[in-house]
Image (cartoon, coloured by chain):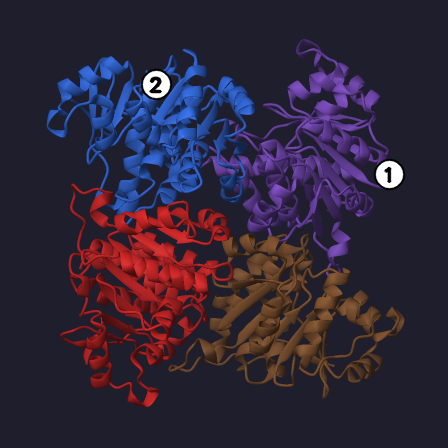
Chain colours: A blue, B purple, C brown, D red
Amino acid sequence: MKKLNQESIHGLIPKRKDDSYKGDYGRILVIGGNESMGGAIIMATSAAVNSGAGLVSVATAKTNHIALHARLPEAMVLDWNNRQALAQQVKAASVLVIGPGMGDSKDSLELLKSVLSLVTENQQIVVDGSAITMMAEHQLSTPKAKTIYTPHLGEWERLSHLKPSEQKESLNQTARAELNATVVLKQHRTEVYFEEDVWKNQAGNPAMATGGMGDTLAGMIAGFLAQLENSKSAVLAAVYLHSHIGDNLAKKQYVVLPTHIIEQLPFTLKEFSEN
Amino acid sequence: MKKLNQESIHGLIPKRKDDSYKGDYGRILVIGGNESMGGAIIMATSAAVNSGAGLVSVATAKTNHIALHARLPEAMVLDWNNRQALAQQVKAASVLVIGPGMGDSKDSLELLKSVLSLVTENQQIVVDGSAITMMAEHQLSTPKAKTIYTPHLGEWERLSHLKPSEQKESLNQTARAELNATVVLKQHRTEVYFEEDVWKNQAGNPAMATGGMGDTLAGMIAGFLAQLENSKSAVLAAVYLHSHIGDNLAKKQYVVLPTHIIEQLPFTLKEFSEN
Amino acid sequence: MKKLNQESIHGLIPKRKDDSYKGDYGRILVIGGNESMGGAIIMATSAAVNSGAGLVSVATAKTNHIALHARLPEAMVLDWNNRQALAQQVKAASVLVIGPGMGDSKDSLELLKSVLSLVTENQQIVVDGSAITMMAEHQLSTPKAKTIYTPHLGEWERLSHLKPSEQKESLNQTARAELNATVVLKQHRTEVYFEEDVWKNQAGNPAMATGGMGDTLAGMIAGFLAQLENSKSAVLAAVYLHSHIGDNLAKKQYVVLPTHIIEQLPFTLKEFSEN
Amino acid sequence: MKKLNQESIHGLIPKRKDDSYKGDYGRILVIGGNESMGGAIIMATSAAVNSGAGLVSVATAKTNHIALHARLPEAMVLDWNNRQALAQQVKAASVLVIGPGMGDSKDSLELLKSVLSLVTENQQIVVDGSAITMMAEHQLSTPKAKTIYTPHLGEWERLSHLKPSEQKESLNQTARAELNATVVLKQHRTEVYFEEDVWKNQAGNPAMATGGMGDTLAGMIAGFLAQLENSKSAVLAAVYLHSHIGDNLAKKQYVVLPTHIIEQLPFTLKEFSEN
């Protein structure tokens, strides 16, 4: 495996072109957040916005709209039960995230199927959390869009059918190839499986071991995909910087909350764009 | 075109008179924010409040009231479907903003028509976002109030009937004259068309290329109109300072969010009021 | 008139006794906030909590509960239409505030009458905003509790039946005596009328001329009344410190928002408690 | 009594193991928050999250969900009337808190009984506020889980049947033994009763005498129990650090609000984990 460290992402965060506008930085649709897990969708969306995405919309349970606006007026909202409006938003997006706080109810499954059937090869999609579990359990195929799965180890077991003891680089890579996707395998030292190579994150720390970190990473990946031309660069930079910020904050914090990382994003991205 | 830079607005932000009260700083009504785009109205309203307006009310979809209060207790709210109360507030306002997050539904169109018919020559109105689109598509006339349109290039095309290639200073100025209004034409270097001259903003940067910046500018223009005697000064100062704050924040931030600019307003206005 | 300045309140903010508990710092009930003006009740309540009151409850329209909790988990809430629960809370309070954002609807009037009839001579009540207007218009008597009115000049005209030109110290004092209350007459230099003397605030500045300042002052007065043994000291200290904090913030801010003053309270009170 | 001071908790906050994940830091369920006291559950939950617990869920009145998410996206929510889902969450939790803002209605009593009957000896439970009062009034037995009661003096009187004059160390200890639990007896200098010894907190100050401090302490105890192997260490560290943070903040603040303490937790825990 290649080591993913500060050098690896040297130069990956571009300076923004002077004469650019929000349309140049992508249009993201984040789908998730049932009645219990609205926080997950708030964190994923905030991460996308603070990463610098041009326009961010959220399709979530109606009960989450108010809290989302109260925290993040920069995002637009949509009732995920309004399937017609959702279909329009899916088509309009350049990058989608599906899964954070989505749950695995019958309604969520139907929603997932519907979104997967709508996305096209010109789009990119991050599949996270319960969306991964539902795809595994219902044997749904990777959609036509360029797909990034972000499973933790348990979700990967379900998706890859590899037992924990079998989850070694070569078998993981075979499973990834069958999925025809990029896989961000979240763990103590997260591994990233691309078609051509595999990377192991060198950053990260146990102060980040708290709920919501995965949702935040999913939102960051989407935010970076929306802005960077090269999607491999986007995934690597998001994975590394998520941990890098966490490492910096952990110098003074016993626990690093997802919202702490999100707030730091504009500042850290600035630093990396200048090197 | 005249260059709009720090010198241009020298002296435009007045020191407040010692013996003044909130009534001296205007009464603003911000109208917009449908069920999907409540964030837009939160940002526009926050910009007006943080600019120093005396009293700010918001007419918006009921679903946005809680998030608005949670972020900004300084503003009063009104259900935009309560047309009787709305009419009273329209009459009471010295400055109105209509359009941020308004959408272009049949209801929104009716609301727009109703407000435009109510405003008088003693008032000032900022027409933004979907309100511009609806005025263009339904050929609504500029209202009797002193009117400032704040289109981006696509909205300007619809409003002026000028194709992108035709959007040069002289044709823009002719279109503006036909509208009998001031036009803030938002773009990489925003242009401001008054009856007597045209200005090109020298400030601004691509870190500001993110959703909500236009809503924030609309709110700032209203806030400044509410306070400054000279409305031309108000528009120029708002356009310049919006970008000036963005430039300062972009020294340390890869993306500058609208809420970051809004928080900075009281401090930057203080600096400019002392020069 | 006596000058109300930093010297006047020297020593009025006591150090807290080491062996004290929240019951020693009063129980406040804040009543107000209709469906349009929920922000007013949020600001008044936040001011009471940040002043150091022991326990603070709010009776307000149900629609304001969520925003209040989102900003201020330290306060308890009550639907103001639940008159039985409200009566219990009125009886339990040591200090009440009635009026911020209350409106003057028929329901509000009934609520006001009900509260005024319930309070006793052992309680203190701050009567603010629309509650003052309703008392004037419906000729309601000052309640049995020790009462502090906080009118602005227009409200004072309604309450005292003095025309602006008649609002001089001696006539104001006569009107105050008829009301059998303390009067905080809000204006450029706020005047405070006690039975034995009259004070004129020397602090304050035009950056504070913005909506919500009065609500904030009402909450502060209640917070101070709840803690200080001497109610005259409480009123004077609240009036002065509200402006004193505003003066400090105005050194760097063009507009000082009520929420800025509220955040500063614990720090400024600390300074004054040590002199 | 042993003195509980900085030395007492030396070494109790462990460094986190490098190769750990959120499952290693416990799964907390916080139960409470009726329609009036949603703030209590927000504070308790925020304290648990900011203490570093791995996963935190909240069962509370539906009306509190939005404010909770708006303040704390890191926690998951559950309608406490959904008894089936609640039972599942109770079983899944390693640590429970019951009582903050719970009220003592008939519904709350039923809920309490149901939870007490479901917990097992492998779990830990913090019983706080109205849950204590209901247990006393309805003579409910300490549940099978390792139990920590956190009464203030009035609640302790109800629970122990000891009059204030009888609440001395030996009788308290006897009452504690009958309860078969740990007792955190909140007061000016809080006392902690374990089976083998009794501790008296040396930290704390009157700036902390404000509503919500107890809810915050209950959440901290749960957060520490979820992470530390030794539950006695967890209780002692939580009690001490709650006051220690309050002491530090009180150097500059006249009143220390619960939310101020909560924000400080990650930083103070870091300091103590390094000594």
- Judging from the image, what secondary structure is the residue with disc 2 in? strand
**Residue position marked by numbered label 1 in the rendering:** B120
Vertical arrangement, residue B195 with respect to residue D85, above or below: above
- Judging from the image, what secondary structure is the residue with disc 1 in? loop
Residue at horizontal 40%, vertical 76%?
Answer: D206
Which of these two is toward me, C124 or A47?
C124
Quadrant into which the N terminus of chain C falls = bottom right
* Residue C274 appears in the rendering: no
Q: Amino acid at mark 2?
A: Thr
At label 2, counting other C-alpha atoms closer than 10 Å, the crowd grade (few under 14, some 14-19, many 20 or more) is many
B275 left or right of B95 in image: left
C85 left or right of C173 in image: left
- Residue A23 on image: x %, y %: 53, 21
Vertical arrangement, residue C53 with respect to residue C101, above or below: below
At label 1, counting other C-alpha atoms closer than 10 Å, the crowd grade (few under 14, some 14-19, many 20 or more) is some
- Residue A66 on image: x %, y %: 54, 43
Q: Amino acid at mark 1?
A: Thr
**Residue position marked by numbered label 2 in the rendering:** A147
B14 left or right of D2 in image: right
Residue at horizontal 39%, vertical 52%?
Answer: D59
> Are marks 1 and 2 in one subunit?
no
Residue A22 badge = none
Which of these two is toward me, C144 or C228?
C144
* Residue D203 appears in the rendering: yes
Please identify the quarter of the rendering in which residue A38 is found.
top left
Q: Chain of mark 2?
A: A
Please identify the quarter of the rendering in which residue A185 is found.
top left
Residue at horizontal 20%, vertical 81%?
Answer: D174
